[in-house]
Image (cartoon, helix red, strand yellow):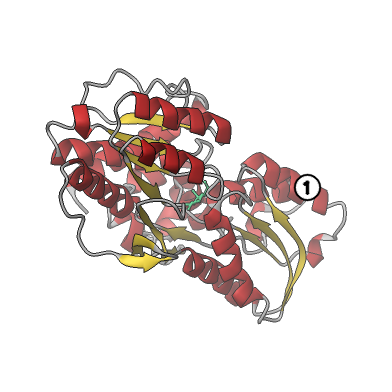
C-alpha cells in the first residue's frame, strides 16, 4: 500500500501504543464535541463522528486516514470536524447537532446505535446536509459503506470450527446489540456454528464491546464450566479476544495451551497474540480502503459531484468491501505487506522468538 498509508500506519501504531498507555489521551480530546479549532470549509465543511475509543482502530486508523485523504482531495474543505462519542448515544446526538451548527454539509457518521440514529440523520438532512453511514448501517442515511459483515461472522466461525476439528464446546461473545454490525457478525457466525458439530455452551452480547466486560463474562464462566469443557471461544472482535485471553490465563489456562480464540480488526495486540499462539485468527478489514473511500465520497458530495457506482444494501446506495482472514501463516502477506504495521511494530522484544518462528524477523 502507499507510502502515505505506511506513514499513517506507523502514526497509528504509535498512537495505539500511546493510547494504550494513556487511555484517555487523544481519543477524548473531542469529547466536548467542539470539533477542535477547524479552519472553516464554509459550505464544504465535512464532519467525522466515530462511536468509541476502546477499540483501537478508530483513533489509530479511521480518523487519521480519513482526515489525511480529505486534505489530499480538497484544499478548500477546511479541517474535518471530528467527534468521538465514547460509546454514548446521547453524546453522539449532541455532536451531530454541534457539527450542523458548525456548518457541516456532509456528515460521516459511525453510529453508537444504528437503529436509533435515524433521528440524527433526519436532523442533518433537514439542515441541508448529507449523511454517509460509516461502517455501521443507518437505513435513513444517504449512503452506507462497510465491509461485508455477515461474511466476517462466517469467516470467524469457520476458522473456529476448523481449529476445533468440528467438535467440542465454545463460549460465544458477540458485540453490542445496539451495533447493527454485531447482529450481522452474529448471524453469519451462527449460520456456520449451528450447522457444525460444535456446541455453544453460553452466549453473551457485550453491551459496549469492552474488553473488561468480555474478561468478566469468561471469568464467571470458569466457575460454571471445567476448563476441559471449553474447547474454543468465538470473540467477535480483538478487543474482546484480549479480555478472553486475560480471563483464561488468569483462570488457570497456560498461555501456550489456550483453546482457539477468534477476533476481528487486526489490532496490533491481536497480531502479536496470533504469532505467539494465544489467539488463532483475526479479520483484517483494510481500514485505508474504508476510510479513504469515505473521504472520496464526502469530498464529492461537498463539491456536488457524482460519487460513482454504488450497490443497494437494504435500500441504501452502498459501498461494500471484502474482509480478509489473518492467521500466523499470512501476517507477513497481509498487514505487513500492506504496511498496515511494520515488522518492527509487531516484533517487540516480548515477541522476538514468535516473530522469528513466523518468518517476520
Ligand atoms: C464494529 C466494527 C468492528 C469493531 C467493532 C467494535 O461495528 O465493524 O470493526 O470495531 O464495531 O467497535
Residue at the image point whose x is 43% and y is 35% from the top: 16
Frontmost residue, 69 versus 92: 92
Residue at the image point whose x is 15% and y is 42% from the top: 303
Q: Position of residue 330 (x, y in %)?
A: 39, 65
Q: Position of residue 33 (x, y in %)?
A: 44, 23
Q: Is residue 34 left or right of residue 67?
A: right
Residue 348, can we see it? Answer: no
How many marks can you see?
1
Q: Secondary structure at mark 1?
A: helix
Vertical placement of 39 versus 100: above or below? above
Check the image and name the residue furthest to the right.
Answer: 224
Check the image and name the residue furthest to the front.
Answer: 126
Residue at the image point whose x is 75% and y is 51% from the top: 218
Q: Is the N terminus in the top left, top right, bottom left or bottom right quadrant? A: bottom left
Check the image and name the residue furthest to the top.
Answer: 37
Frontmost residue, 234 versus 17: 234
Q: Position of residue 173 (x, y in %)?
A: 67, 56
Q: Is residue 18 left or right of residue 164?
A: left
Q: Residue 121's image quarter?
A: top left
Q: Callout 1: few (<14), some (14-19), or many (20+) C-alpha neighbours within 10 Å? A: some
Residue 19, can we see it? Answer: yes
Residue at the image point whose x is 22% and y is 46% from the top: 301
Q: Position of residue 296 (x, y in %)?
A: 21, 48
| Residue labelled 1 has its Cβ within 8 Å of some atom of ligand 1 | no
Q: Is residue 323 left or right of residue 76?
A: right
Q: Which residue matches tag 1? A: 219
Amino acid at each position: 500500500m502507499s507510502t502515505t498509508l505506511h506513514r499513517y500506519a506507523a502514526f497509528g501504531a504509535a498512537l495505539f501504543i500511546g493510547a494504550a498507555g494513556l487511555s484517555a489521551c487523544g481519543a477524548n480530546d473531542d469529547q466536548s464535541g467542539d470539533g477542535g479549532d477547524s479552519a472553516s470549509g464554509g459550505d464544504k465543511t465535512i464532519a467525522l463522528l466515530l462511536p468509541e475509543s476502546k477499540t483501537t482502530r478508530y483513533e489509530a486508523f479511521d480518523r487519521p486516514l480519513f482526515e489525511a485523504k480529505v486534505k489530499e482531495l480538497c484544499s478548500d474543505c477546511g479541517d474535518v470536524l471530528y467527534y468521538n462519542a465514547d460509546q454514548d448515544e446521547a453524546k453522539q446526538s449532541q455532536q451531530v447537532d454541534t457539527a450542523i451548527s458548525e456548518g457541516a454539509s456532509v456528515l460521516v457518521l459511525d453510529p453508537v446505535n444504528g437503529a436509533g440514529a435515524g433521528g440524527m440523520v433526519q436532523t442533518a438532512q433537514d439542515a441541508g446536509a448529507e449523511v454517509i453511514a460509516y461502517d455501521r448501517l443507518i437505513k435513513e442515511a444517504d449512503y452506507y459503506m462497510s465491509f461485508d459483515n455477515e461474511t466476517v461472522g462466517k469467516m470467524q466461525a469457520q476458522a473456529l470450527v476448523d481449529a476445533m476439528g468440528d467438535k467440542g464446546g465454545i463460549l460465544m461473545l458477540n458485540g453490542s446489540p445496539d451495533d447493527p454490525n454485531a447482529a450481522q457478525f452474529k448471524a453469519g457466525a451462527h449460520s456456520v456454528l449451528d450447522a457444525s458439530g460444535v456446541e455453544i455452551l453460553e452466549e453473551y452480547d457485550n453491551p459496549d464491546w469492552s474488553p473488561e466486560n468480555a474478561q468478566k463474562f469468561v471469568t464467571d464462566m470458569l466457575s460454571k464450566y471445567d476448563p476441559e469443557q471449553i474447547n474454543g471461544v468465538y470473540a467477535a472482535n480483538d478487543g474482546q479476544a484480549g479480555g478472553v485471553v486475560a480471563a483464561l490465563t488468569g483462570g488457570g489456562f497456560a498461555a501456550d495451551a489456550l483453546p482457539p480464540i477468534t477476533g476481528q480488526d487486526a489490532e496490533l495486540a491481536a497480531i502479536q497474540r496470533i504469532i505467539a499462539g494465544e489467539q488463532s485468527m483475526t479479520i483484517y478489514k483494510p481500514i485505508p480502503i474504508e476510510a479513504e473511500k469515505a473521504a472520496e465520497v464526502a469530498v464529492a458530495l461537498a463539491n456536488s459531484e457524482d460519487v460513482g457506482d454504488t450497490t443497494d444494501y437494504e435500500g441504501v446506495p452502498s459501498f461494500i468491501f471484502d474482509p480478509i482472514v489473518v492467521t500466523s501463516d499470512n501476517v507477513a502477506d497481509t498487514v505487513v505487506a500492506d504496511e498496515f504495521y511494520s515488522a518492527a511494530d509487531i516484533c517487540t522484544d516480548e515477541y522476538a522468538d514468535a516473530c522469528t518462528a513466523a518468518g517476520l524477523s
